[in-house]
């Protein structure tokens, strides 16, 4: 799969003879090597989940958040280089506040996704900038209902009902496709996301990880927030149980 | 509403007026000019025309409100916006005044911003026209970006941002009304300082002073379209009867899920109130009658 673009991969402003921009593809590789990030759209909201790989035992639990709130009604989960992700989040927050200041209403999620995608794409147009080494999954609940978007380092943005990026994305996507999302509430969705993340986590390669979950749904009053602790614990227990069941087979 | 600030312009004497004179003020030099003008005018009129006409012109000049054709056009006005079950009805009179002269007796004060949002304009005609033009432009771009019609709230917010941020230079009191699929019919009032306030109904302009009590009594929630339209026309005609700066015809615009409907109520279709005279088609009708009818008290 991986090809070396000898000579055509030195700058993001260079095309290869077969029409590829290698720098962008390399940026996507940075995303592929990070912990899995999943987002699903249930019938009453969005659930975002991140497999946060812990690099040191001395790290405080709950630090280095990978899921950020952009606005009251939407959240961003970051996969890839965390510092790059912070930049995107800052920009998204700024776009959201600006929009509300000018137009007097919260930014529609579609518009926010467009703006984030434009910003990410911007950095692939100039030789003196490097592309963002991170992709984001944006989930929000506005007056048109819950919506889920994924923005890749190339600047592509699509709307999804289930999206995954990072190490375990192939396996995660397969799992998500098995779910009946249109009939699922977010409460159930949280449990499912936890199961998937525990399922795709590779015990051999990466030892410890922390599960970060957030949602925005009717139950959370259409606000984006961390999943409440009791539900989080319930999800983790269910996920571990499911894993053992699989192992037992 | 008469304009407080007078702009540059040549008055009948040919002297350039100072800007930013308060309504009714004039520099000593200017009043001397106007006094001398009126005096000479009076004398001329006394000799050439009837005594009456000269006297009237003299009175006009001495009385603070000059027959000043270069005063800024203001929409001394009555504007009304009401919500009903299913949409909104916007109504306005049609008088644009320049001082005491009616510059346009059939003006259209209800302006389109988008297919589903209209504004009623009061205050300085120029100011409100420019604001409408800007907001129409911004909304057009916003609609393209969004891919669907803009909401009434967004339109009203854009109007008030312009109004608030330029409050020192503008005199514009508007009522933004429209319909969108999320909130249905809405009315937003954006008066002089740039406040924005959503209300079930709103009134504005100089003629509105006479309507506060009327609406307190006559307004009710969830009217039908016919009731709302009757209410607006009745209110407008009441205000036009009492406010010198409002008059002419009544125009209404109804906005709902089906679209926009414009209606026109000519002077002869409007109700008369308490001692008002019947509108006549032409002065010639009066003059052509051989025996003038005695005036009734």
Image: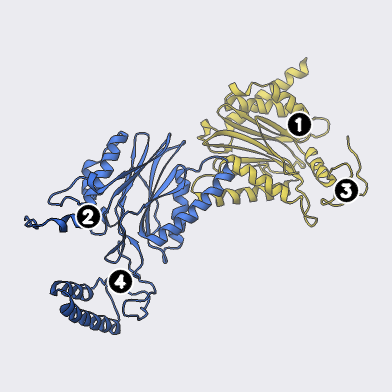
Chain colours: A yellow, B blue
Q: Residues within 10 Å of mark 3 (few under 14, many from 20)?
A: some
What residue did someone put label 2 on? B282
Frontmost of labels 3 and 2 is 2
Q: Residues within 10 Å of mark 1 (few under 14, many from 20)?
A: some
Q: Chain of mark 1?
A: A
What residue did someone put label 3 on? A9
Q: Chain of mark 4?
A: B
* SS class, disc 4: loop
* SS class, disc 3: loop
The residue sitting at 14% across, 73% down in the picture is B50
Frontmost of labels 4 and 3 is 4
The residue sitting at 67% across, 43% down in the picture is A65
Q: Kindly indicate whether the residue at mark 4 contacts the one at mark 1 (C-beta within 8 angstroms).
A: no
Q: Chain of mark 3?
A: A
Frontmost of labels 3 and 1 is 3
Q: Examine the image and state in which quarter residue B95 appears.
A: bottom left
What residue did someone put label 1 on? A169
Frontmost of labels 1 and 4 is 4
* Nearer-the-camera pick, B296 or B91: B296
| Residue A207, above or below A153 | above
Q: Chain of mark 2?
A: B
Q: Quadrant of the N terminus of chain A?
A: top right
- Residue A13 in percent (x, y) is at 82, 52
- Cα distance, mark 4 to mark 2? 25 Å
The residue sitting at 32% across, 69% down in the picture is B69
Instruction: Say if residue B43 shows up in the picture.
Output: yes
- Residue B230 in percent (x, y) is at 26, 39
- Cα distance, mark 2 to mark 1? 83 Å
Q: Residues within 10 Å of mark 2 (few under 14, many from 20)?
A: few
What residue did someone put label 4 on? B68
* SS class, disc 2: loop
């Amino acid at each position: 799969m991986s090809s070396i673009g000898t000579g055509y991969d030195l700058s993001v402003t260079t095309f290869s003879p077969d029409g590829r921009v290698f720098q962008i593809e390399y940026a996507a590789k940075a995303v592929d090597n990070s912990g899995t990030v999943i987002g699903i759209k249930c019938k009453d909201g969005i659930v975002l989940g991140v497999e946060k790989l812990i690099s040191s035992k001395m790290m405080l639990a709950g630090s280095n958040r990978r899921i950020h709130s952009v606005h009251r009604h939407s959240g961003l989960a970051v996969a890839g280089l965390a510092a790059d992700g912070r930049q995107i989040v800052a920009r998204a927050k700024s776009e959201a506040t600006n929009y509300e200041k000018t137009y007097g209403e919260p930014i529609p999620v579609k518009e926010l996704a467009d703006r984030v995608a434009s910003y990410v794409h911007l950095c692939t147009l100039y030789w003196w900038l490097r592309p963002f080494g991170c992709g984001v999954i944006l989930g929000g609940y506005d007056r048109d209902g819950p919506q889920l978007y994924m923005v890749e380092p190339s600047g592509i943005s699509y709307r999804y009902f289930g999206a995954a990026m990072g190490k375990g994305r192939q396996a995660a996507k397969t799992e998500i496709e098995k779910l009946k999302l249109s009939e699922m509430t977010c409460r159930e969705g949280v449990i499912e996301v936890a199961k998937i993340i525990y399922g795709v986590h590779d015990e051999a390669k990466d030892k410890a990880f922390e599960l970060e979950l957030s949602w925005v749904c009717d139950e959370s009053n259409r606000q984006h927030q961390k999943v409440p602790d009791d539900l989080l614990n319930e999800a983790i227990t269910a996920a571990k149980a499911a894993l053992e069941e699989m192992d037992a087979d | 509403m008469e304009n407080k600030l007078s702009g540059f312009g040549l008055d009948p004497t040919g002297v350039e007026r100072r800007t930013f004179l308060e309504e009714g003020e004039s520099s000593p030099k200017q009043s001397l000019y106007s006094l001398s003008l009126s005096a000479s005018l009076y004398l001329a009129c006394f000799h050439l025309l009837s005594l009456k006409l000269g006297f009237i012109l003299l009175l006009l000049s001495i009385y603070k409100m000059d027959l000043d054709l270069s005063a800024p056009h203001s929409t001394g006005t009555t504007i009304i916006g009401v919500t009903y079950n299913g949409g909104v009805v916007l109504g306005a009179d049609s008088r644009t005044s320049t001082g005491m002269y009616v510059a346009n007796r059939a003006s259209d004060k209800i302006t389109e911003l988008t297919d589903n949002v209209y504004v009623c304009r009061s205050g300085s005609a120029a100011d409100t026209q420019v604001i409408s033009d800007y907001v129409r432009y911004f909304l057009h771009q916003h609609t393209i970006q969004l891919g669907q019609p803009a909401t009434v709230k967004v339109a009203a917010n854009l109007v008030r941002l312009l109004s608030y941020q330029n409050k020192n230079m503008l005199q514009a009191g508007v009522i933004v009304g429209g319909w969108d699929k999320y909130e249905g019919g809405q009315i937003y009032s954006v008066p002089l300082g740039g406040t924005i306030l959503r209300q079930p109904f709103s009134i504005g302009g100089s003629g509105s002073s006479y309507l506060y009590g009327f609406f307190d009594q006559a307004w009710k929630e969830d009217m039908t379209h016919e009731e709302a339209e009757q209410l607006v026309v009745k209110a407008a005609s009441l205000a036009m009867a009492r406010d010198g700066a409002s008059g002419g015809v009544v125009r209404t615009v109804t906005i709902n899920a089906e679209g926009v409907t414009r209606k026109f109520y000519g002077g002869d279709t409007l109700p008369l109130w308490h001692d008002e005279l019947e509108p006549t088609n032409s002065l010639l009708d009066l003059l052509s009658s051989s025996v003038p009818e005695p005036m009734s008290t």
